[in-house]
Image (spheres, coloured by chain):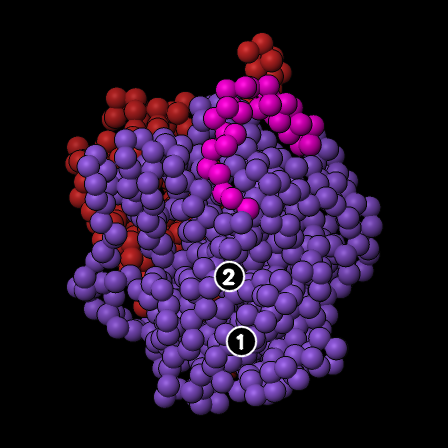
């Protein structure tokens, strides 16, 4: 007993106070890629290189539409390698959760020359980053849910990568319970379903039943590229794609997998959503 | 041809059509028919060979046949022996080995499900991979499009063995579990507290992965390999890369081989630490798990510093590794693993100081070594039950031929020993990383020429932290993959969980399950 106590005291406090302070990131951390739309000369190599089809190029005469879907991005960096002129680079952004699927999309219009190189950026729509801060969101939980949020996690077909990061929310470093959030064993006790995907045909029914078993008002958060869009698996004979193909989704958290702070940010954002529903 | 194969040809002149070694260390024996029973018996009785995996391939368009592949591993011989048995497309059945070799029970049924080729004489020929309510489809046939939209499933659900007897109850659990784990269905029959038997239903997370590999270029398939089993992303991706490199004739620079070795061991360390904590947690030693969680965060910070990803994503690539390390990063890694090693030593001391923990773990979830051998159990679960297998030593890859380490093997086969194997391996891995960094060569970390020769096949094996991960590929035109077979160690090891829980109280199921910690997604693909 004494040894246990001694060990605990020696370890000290390791809990990171995110979202009150910024997340502690390793210097090599890769966040979502960033696009210098005005100086992007050719989006085609990046679109060809992307393993999940997150970058799409559509040409119509001398006009080109480029869309980037952060809801498909697995943060591999292939678009950066394919774009030697430097208009695409890996950033450090991970607080990218969004309440609307469209808010994860960048859309840009270009005029192009005969060889298909982009000349001018004529139109650009990027996700609205004027979101509430994590700190504001954290205070919401106290007001709306009486200081507690109960989450039921549902793996609807994931590779287990997202689950590892969700489990990490419970460790002493991230310690999600300090915010009044805890994971519960049954959907009947839950305010929120945290769902990973892609939703497989074999989990579709179980996911619907879990949703139905969760009392109203309820929140659904889709986790990771696969939970949002099917990710690299997309939609095929065995998968339905993203969670919103099966049940309504309140918040989407991009990443592959989203790091624990990204999960926390998305969970807190969803709590903010609940305010509007009540 | 070595005397072994000469003798084999003389003994089975009717069955063997040719013997080739298309890739060094991988001997392919082409047979004249689909029946491998005689040869398999011969390998197993005469050479104590292990049937590692069985899988099929649709070559109907190209050659008018399906092939069944039987991969054998002979103790003490670094070569894989692959029997390649043609099955005419109009016959579509083969002789089952499952009655004699329970290890291939599920794998033969997978062939039935994926290809519609019947395993004649299989003791339990029911569906395994496709659930019972699926329509009659065979997704890995080339004439089945990946994007096929199947109608709503209205077929019958799986019928479990009935639970009979006075006071015997059935406890169905899953696929949505109480903890944060992957989905699967466990159907327990209990008499009071003790478990009489457990029936499993897997493949809830089946995502069409092997089929999807056939559509992606190899460079993109790599990212799919990272998502087969998320906790083993680097091991799976490396196994995939090695298979493509061997088949396609890509030379990997020596620096990359050492870097791969370091990363594979880092993956083992972070997962083993997590499991040691989780086992402690499941018997109520919460503080030990809290420390393990803290240590795992340290390990993941190391991963992130070296690869940009806590789970080592985006680092593997064909022909080497994607990002080189500076001297500063290598030095920081040395310091970090030394700190982690010291902390882990303290954690182990803490665990060992608790008699009540030992009491809960010792003789819990016993897997008899003979059972483990019969079921073909691999990896951590195997080594705790006397199965002395380690791909790193038996079929060296990456830089393992330059390193030495002790393979921990125990005979007691209980949860305590499965935890002990992990503990031993963490210390071995730390030493291996140090040794690999000591002799880390200079030069490039990625091959310059990444073109893949088409129409070639190769097998690759990696000792992931769970055990033996196998990939087999056939390369196609335009850097594509025509067939990619994945075998995660979990597929072999689920029957071990079924064996190990029998007679234990139901309250010990979580810790027994955790002590194997198998991948559902790796099993289901």
**Residue B334 on image: x %, y %:** 75, 38
Tell me the magenta residue range: B340-369
Task: Point out the frontmost of discs 1 and 2.
Answer: 1
* Secondary structure state at the residue bearing disc 2: strand
Task: Provide the chain ID for the residue under circle 1.
Answer: B
Which labelled disc corresponds to residue B38?
1
Answer yes or no: are tags 1 and 2 on the same subunit: yes
Kindly report the secondary structure that dominates the magenta region of the rendered protein: helix
Q: A197 or B511, which lies in front?
A: B511
State left or right for residue B314 relative to residue B166: right
Q: Colour of chain A?
A: red
**Residue B352 on image: x %, y %:** 60, 23
Which labelled disc corresponds to residue B487?
2
Residue B360 on the magenta segment: yes
**Residue A266 on image: x %, y %:** 37, 39
Q: On the rendered image, what quadrant is the N terminus of chain B found in?
A: bottom right
Instruction: Tell me the distance, in whole angstroms, between the alpha carbons under discs 1 and 2.
Output: 25 Å
* Secondary structure state at the residue bearing disc 1: helix
Residue for point 47% across, 81% down: B34
In the picture, which chain is purple?
B
């Amino acid at each position: 007993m004494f040894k246990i106590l001694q060990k605990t005291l020696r370890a000290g406090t390791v809990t990171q106070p995110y979202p009150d302070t910024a997340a502690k990131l390793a210097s090599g951390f890769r966040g979502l890629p960033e696009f210098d739309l005005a100086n992007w000369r050719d989006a085609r190599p990046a679109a060809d290189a992307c393993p999940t089809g997150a970058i799409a190029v559509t040409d119509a005469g001398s006009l080109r539409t480029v869309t980037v879907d952060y809801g498909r991005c697995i943060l591999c960096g292939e678009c950066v390698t394919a774009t030697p002129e430097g208009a695409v680079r890996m950033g450090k952004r991970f607080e990218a959760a969004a309440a609307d699927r469209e808010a994860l999309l960048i859309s840009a219009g270009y005029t192009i020359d005969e060889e298909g190189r982009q000349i001018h950026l004529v139109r650009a729509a990027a996700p609205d980053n004027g979101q509430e801060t994590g700190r504001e969101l954290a205070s919401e939980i106290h007001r709306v849910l009486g200081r507690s949020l109960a989450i039921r996690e549902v793996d609807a077909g994931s590779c287990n990568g997202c689950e590892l990061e969700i489990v990490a929310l419970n460790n002493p470093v991230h310690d999600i319970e300090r915010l009044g959030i805890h994971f519960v064993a049954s959907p009947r006790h839950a305010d929120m379903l945290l769902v990973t995907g892609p939703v497989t045909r074999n989990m579709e029914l179980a996911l619907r039943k879990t949703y139905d078993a969760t009392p109203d008002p309820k929140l659904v958060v889709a986790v990771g590229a696969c939970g949002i869009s099917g990710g690299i698996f997309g939609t095929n004979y065995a998968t339905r794609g993203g969670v919103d193909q099966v049940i309504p989704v309140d918040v989407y958290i991009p990443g592959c997998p989203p790091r624990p702070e990204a999960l926390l940010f998305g969970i807190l954002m969803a709590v903010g959503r609940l305010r509007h529903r009540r | 041809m070595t005397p072994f194969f000469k003798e084999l040809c003389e003994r089975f002149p009717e069955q063997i059509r040719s013997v080739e070694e298309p890739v060094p260390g991988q001997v392919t024996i082409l047979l004249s028919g689909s029946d491998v029973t005689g040869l398999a018996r011969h390998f197993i009785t005469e050479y104590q060979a292990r049937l590692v995996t069985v899988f099929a391939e649709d070559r109907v368009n190209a050659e008018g046949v399906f092939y069944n592949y039987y991969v054998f591993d002979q103790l003490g011989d670094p070569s894989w022996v692959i029997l390649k048995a043609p099955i005419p497309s109009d016959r579509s059945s083969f002789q089952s080995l499952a009655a004699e070799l329970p290890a291939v029970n599920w794998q033969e049924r997978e062939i039935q499900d994926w290809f519609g080729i019947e395993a004649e004489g299989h003791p339990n020929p029911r569906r395994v991979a496709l659930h019972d309510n699926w329509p009659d489809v065979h997704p890995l046939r080339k004439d089945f499009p990946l994007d096929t939209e199947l109608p709503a499933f209205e077929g019958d659900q799986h019928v479990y063995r009935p639970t009979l007897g006075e006071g015997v109850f059935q406890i169905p659990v899953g696929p949505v579990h109480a903890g944060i784990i992957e989905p699967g269905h466990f159907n327990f029959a209990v008499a009071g507290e003790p478990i009489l038997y457990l029936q499993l239903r897997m493949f809830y997370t089946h995502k069409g992965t092997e089929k999807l590999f056939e559509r992606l270029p190899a460079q993109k398939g790599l990212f799919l390999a990272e998502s087969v089993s998320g906790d083993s992303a680097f091991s799976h991706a490396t196994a995939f890369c090695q298979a493509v490199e061997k088949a396609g004739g890509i030379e990997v620079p020596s620096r990359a081989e050492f870097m791969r070795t370091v990363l594979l061991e880092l993956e083992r360390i972070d997962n083993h630490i997590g499991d040691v904590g989780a086992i402690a947690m499941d018997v109520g030693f919460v503080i030990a798990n809290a420390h393990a969680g803290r240590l795992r965060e340290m390990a993941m910070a190391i991963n992130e510093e070296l690869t940009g990803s806590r789970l080592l994503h985006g680092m593997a690539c064909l022909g080497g590794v994607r990002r080189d390390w500076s001297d500063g990063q290598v030095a920081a890694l040395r310091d970090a693993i030394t700190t982690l090693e010291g902390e882990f030593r303290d954690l182990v001391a803490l665990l060992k100081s608790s008699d009540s923990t030992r009491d809960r773990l010792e003789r819990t979830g016993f897997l008899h070594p003979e059972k483990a051998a019969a079921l073909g159990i691999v990896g951590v679960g195997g080594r705790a039950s006397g199965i002395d297998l380690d791909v790193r030593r038996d079929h060296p890859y990456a830089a393992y031929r330059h390193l030495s380490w002790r393979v921990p093997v125990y005979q007691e086969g209980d949860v305590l020993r499965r935890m002990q194997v992990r503990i031993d391996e963490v210390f071995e891995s730390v030493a291996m990383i140090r040794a690999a960094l000591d002799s880390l060569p200079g030069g490039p970390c990625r091959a310059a020429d990444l073109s893949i020769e088409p129409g070639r096949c190769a097998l690759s094996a990696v000792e992931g932290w769970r055990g033996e991960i196998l990939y087999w590929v056939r390369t196609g035109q335009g850097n594509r993959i025509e067939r990619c077979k994945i075998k995660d160690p979990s597929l072999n090891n689920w029957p071990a969980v079924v064996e190990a829980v029998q007679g234990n109280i139901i309250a010990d199921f979580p810790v027994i399950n955790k002590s194997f910690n198998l991948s559902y997604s790796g099993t289901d693909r």
